[in-house]
Image (cartoon, rainbow, N blue to C red):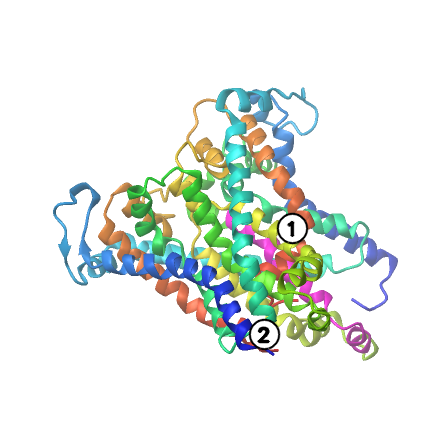
Amino acid sequence: MATQQTTAAGRILVAPSVILLFAWMIVPLAMTLYFSSLRYSLLDAENSGFVGLQNYTAFLSDPDFIAALFNTLILVGSVLVISVCGGILVALLMDQPVFGQTVLRLMVIAPFFVMPTVSALVWKNLLMNPDSGLFAWIAISLGFSPVVWFTNHPMLSVIIVVSWEWLPFASLILLTALQSLDEEQKEAASLDGAGPISYFGYIVLPHIARAITVVILIETIFLLSVFAEIYVTTSGGPGVATTNIPFLVYKQALLDFDVGSASAGGVIAVVLANVVAIFLMRIVGRNLEG
Amino acid sequence: MAMKQSAGKRVGVTVLAWVVAFLIFFPILWTFITSFKSELDAIAMPPKFLFFNWTLENYVEVQSRSNYLRFAENSIILSIGANIVGLLISVPAAWSMAFAPTKRTKDVLMWMLSTKMMPAVGVLVPIYLLFRDLHLLDSLWGIGFVLMLLNLPILIWMLYTYFKEIPVDILEAARMDGASLLNEIIYILTPMAAPGIASTMLLTVILSWNEAFWTLNLATSNAAPLTAFIASYSAPEGFFWAKLSAASTLAIAPILVLGWFSQKQLVRGLTFGAVK
């Protein structure tokens, strides 16, 4: 249907977006790649020069990097398991015809709209503080001694906070998928006398499998970049206990002013994210055709 | 489930659903309640749930001591400004891709989406240095520009899916009647596309409001929005929980209300149409 005229007009209309995104992504990425091959410190800008892959070998053999990589994987993996499993349960529950369903859904989705700095500080202080947080009171009431969350279990604490932020997202997406389940299929299953477990395993799970995949991929993209929660609670510590790759890169660039090394870290983060992105793009692309 | 449930089971499910929802929502409720306590009541052990002297002094202090409104203003300017500019750029692009697709449209869309997958730390260093040299650090223009670019792929994608739903026949009919491109846009397309544009904007405003990587790294004081203001509570002096709660309540309340209206758009916008 597109005539030559509209094609030309179309190009002009799309061009600004393409140019801006190109400038935003490709150009800085190229600069990051370039910086990553330099000895380049902001504190000693005179003394810079080409060092090849030296930043990468330094970065990859740095114990802090190994720890950060490990922390990143633990954080992403744990939050995925908690939010997806929890999200399936919450979605199943919210799909039930119960009294006040609309209000329930609003309550469940709410944490997703809370800015990361607020969630992290509220959890750290109001709930998880060992002296006067609510969890301490619950622990004491039950006869336990309060847990010193962010000092003794820093990574677990961060995982809990981030899981709380992402559970609503998983629940909402999975609930949307559940709601498109065919009524007839439900009835057929109940006529066949399917129990709750086989009903879930044979009807529900296959139906929401795609939504689960999408949730996993999208959350992974965002979870690989968790930053604010760590920035305001632990600053990556104690030691490097909660330093993930984004935080390590931030530390090297803006606190240690080591541009070369931080850039190498940035490139590694991009490679990690791209592995996930490729799978996500395939799913979205398939959908675009249908 | 479709099975007929006994009354007892139904009550059980209802109670369980309410308990779960309450637990998930509780931290927000607790922040809200704490914002009305005195600092001493806020750290009282055992905690005071409802019976304490409710006070508004935290809200007054948050404003008078740290000039809360200035940060709120920055948040509003950044999230709304960035997305209005974003719309001006993305509406024409999405329009032409939806109504005059070419062979490469799909590839362009996919490529735009892929820019969203790039982790921010991958470009933190060059953007930071560029901004430093261009004096854009801690400026509303600089940060607004970044927020606009972050949302541009989502804007285009969502608008594209909304525009796709507009029946093309109507446009063809208008063209037959001799409507010019401009008339077509003003009288036919705009009214039909307005709801989609509004819901898209709703979601991207929420995302910008809560963005906390670039705002924390590029803003220090003048252009700092609420994300950065709240972060300043991470190393405070003295009692501060009630004030933190008041500041937090103010920072999340408007977006919570907007968010509740935007649930459907959230699914569409964040899954790029992969879940319906």
**Residue drawn 44% across the image and 55% down it:** A75
Query: Residue A184 in magenta?
Result: yes
Q: Is residue B40 above or below residue B219?
A: above
Q: Is residue A258 left or right of residue A290?
A: left
Are the residues flagged by discs 2 and 1 in contact, CB closer than 8 Å?
no
- x, y percent for residue B94: 56, 63
Q: Quadrant of the N terminus of chain A?
A: bottom right
N-term-proximal mark, 2 vs 1: 1
- Please report the residue visible at 73 percent of the width from the left and 65 percent of the height from the top: A179
Chain on which label 2 sits: A
Q: Quadrant of residue A201?
A: bottom right
- Rendered view: B250 above or below B64: below
Judging by the rendered image, the residue that carries numbered circle 2 is: A287
Q: Secondary structure at mark 1?
A: helix
Q: Position of residue B224 (x, y in %)?
A: 45, 35
Name the mark on residue A109: 1
Q: Residues within 10 Å of mark 1 (few under 14, many from 20)?
A: many
Q: Which residues are magenta?
A: A161-189
